């Protein structure tokens, strides 16, 4: 299978890439690792006339801890996120999620920025990054701006990025002591994509009660959803098995997931409560360490 | 001039199995077709052609990747290793030997990809458990259902490689 014909250029800087985007307008499409875009192009689901390859642009790869944040370059591949020492130290839930994307070969090419910009409703990264309260840095010809994760995923395969913007960085606040993060996923047995998944960030007080919680669920909507009812249920309460179970039971409230050939609406909603519980329990265990 | 016409021919330099190749490719040329059709290295197979089966696995700058999902243009400046580059003259790589010793193949179609992924695993984990081997080979599908012997083959190779100086 071959994609339809297109033009290709590999700019050497973000500035050059932005110039090319301005020049080619809607004909242009950014290429990161290509592990969503190239398969779609081979199936002729997408036929951009011009690809701007960010793969060789310096400065877009790598992970560093700086100023209370973990800063991840948009072109950093999943394998590097999964095995990064600062990620494992500060937010192992992100490492969990990166390690279950696709397979080894896919993780060696697919990028964190490509995944979030593609915004597949069955992807892993949007879910865990929602739980971890990520901020996205976008550059355009007029400068750069930041977008909060809660404002970023706007619809199926759609984000708040403008057509003239390049996602360059993902920033994550390094959580305070007593915080645990985790990701739990039910993968589709054939594709490995998310049927339902949950990301959790729990900060625990010394007394054992919940100081704060962010819970995100994947698979129930056009993008990741915050399980607000679950978060409220946990807030200030002792993190016992019973309270976690009662909170997780609310993880699919006010959702209406679309039935598909593999799973019904009711099944997805039920499984969401199970995986929310798994993620919260794992985050609480890590918060105790 | 249309966007397609403007950059319709991409000059690339790719080092494959230690040999440098200068070429000009059409942008939509996939790496696997560059290897098979431009360079005649047909050991790398096209299986599903949808990034599922792993038959097209090669090493790109030392990492196992699916060459049906990478443009040849994206490999510009990179080092590629294919199944043809594994043996040292007539001496098989230990993973190739392992597949022979433990009957790790039946039809052989998935084998180049299986071996390239296994080599990548053993370069990063010299003594993997059965579970780690299975997890590492998730992206490689065998339709002869030879997985048990494939895991045995990789274990055999791991042991041999650990004994080598």
Image: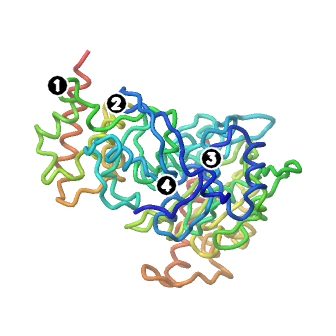
Q: Residue at x 71, y 60 (%)?
A: A214
Q: Is residue A92 left or right of residue B122?
A: right
Q: Chain of mark 4?
A: B
Q: Nearer the viewer, residue A41 or A161?
A: A41
Q: Chain of mark 2?
A: B
- Residue picked out by circle 4: B28
Q: Position of residue A288 (x, y in %)?
A: 63, 45
- Residue picked out by circle 3: A9
Q: Are marks 3 and 2 in contact (CB under 8 Å)?
A: no
Question: Which of the 4 quarters of the picture holds residue A57?
Answer: top right
Q: Chain of mark 1?
A: B
Separation (CA) of disc 3 from disc 1: 41 Å
- Residue picked out by circle 2: B17
Neighbourhood count class around disc 3 (C-alpha, 10 Å): few under 14, some 14–19, many 20 upward: many
Q: Position of residue A277 (x, y in %)?
A: 56, 65
- Residue picked out by circle 1: B91
Q: For the residue labelled by badge 3, is the local secondary structure a helix, a strand or a loop?
A: strand
Q: Are marks 3 and 1 on the same chain?
A: no
Q: Residue at x 34, y 52 (%)?
A: B54
Neighbourhood count class around disc 1 (C-alpha, 10 Å): few under 14, some 14–19, many 20 upward: few
Q: Nearer the viewer, residue A190 or A207?
A: A190
Q: Is residue B76 visible?
A: yes
Q: Name the N-terminal-most of marks 2 and 1.
A: 2
Separation (CA) of disc 2 from disc 1: 16 Å
Q: Nearer the viewer, residue A269 or A100?
A: A100
Q: Are marks 4 and 2 in contact (CB under 8 Å)?
A: no
Separation (CA) of disc 4 from disc 1: 36 Å
Q: Name the N-terminal-most of marks 4 and 1.
A: 4
């Amino acid at each position: 299978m071959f994609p339809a014909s297109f033009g290709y250029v590999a700019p050497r800087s973000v500035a050059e890439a932005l110039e090319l985007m301005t020049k080619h307008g809607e004909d242009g499409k950014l290429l990161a690792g290509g592990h969503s875009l190239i398969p779609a192009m081979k199936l002729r689901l997408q036929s951009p006339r011009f690809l701007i390859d960010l793969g060789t642009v310096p400065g877009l790869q790598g992970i560093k801890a700086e100023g209370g944040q973990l800063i991840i370059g948009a072109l950093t591949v999943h394998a590097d996120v999964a095995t990064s020492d600062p990620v494992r130290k500060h937010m192992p839930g992100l490492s969990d999620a990166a390690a279950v994307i696709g397979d080894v070969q896919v993780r060696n090419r697919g990028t964190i920025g490509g995944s979030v910009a593609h915004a597949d409703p069955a992807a892993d990264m949007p879910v865990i990054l929602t739980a971890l309260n990520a901020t996205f840095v976008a550059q355009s010809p007029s400068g750069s701006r930041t977008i909060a994760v809660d404002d970023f995923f706007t619809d199926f395969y759609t984000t708040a990025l403008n057509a003239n913007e390049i996602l360059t960085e993902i920033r994550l606040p390094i959580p305070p002591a007593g915080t645990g993060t985790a990701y739990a996923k039910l993968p589709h047995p054939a594709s490995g994509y998310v049927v339902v998944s949950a990301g959790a960030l729990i900060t625990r007080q010394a007394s054992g009660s919940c100081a704060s919680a962010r819970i995100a669920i994947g698979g129930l909507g056009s993008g990741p959803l915050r399980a607000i009812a679950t978060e409220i249920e946990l807030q200030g309460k002792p993190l016992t098995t019973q309270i976690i179970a009662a909170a997780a039971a609310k993880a699919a409230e006010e959702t209406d997931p679309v039935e598909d050939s593999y799973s019904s609406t009711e099944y997805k909603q039920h499984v969401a409560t199970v995986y929310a519980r798994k993620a919260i329990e794992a985050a609480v265990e890590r918060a105790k360490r | 001039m249309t966007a397609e016409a403007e950059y319709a021919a991409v000059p690339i330099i790719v080092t494959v199995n230690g040999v440098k190749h200068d070429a000009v490719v059409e942008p939509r040329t996939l790496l696997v077709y560059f290897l098979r059709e431009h360079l005649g290295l047909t050991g790398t197979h096209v299986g599903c052609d949808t990034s599922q089966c792993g038959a097209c696995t090669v090493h790109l700058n030392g990492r196992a990747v699916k060459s049906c999902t990478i443009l040849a243009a994206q490999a510009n400046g990179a080092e590629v290793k294919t199944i043809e580059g594994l043996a040292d003259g007539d001496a098989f790589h230990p993973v190739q030997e392992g597949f022979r010793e433990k009957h790790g193949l039946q039809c052989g179609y998935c084998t180049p990809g299986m071996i390239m992924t296994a080599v990548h695993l053993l370069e990063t984990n010299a003594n993997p458990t059965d579970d780690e081997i299975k997890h590492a080979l998730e992206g490689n599908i065998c339709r002869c259902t030879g997985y048990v012997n494939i895991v045995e083959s990789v274990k055999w190779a791991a042991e041999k490689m650990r004994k080598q100086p």
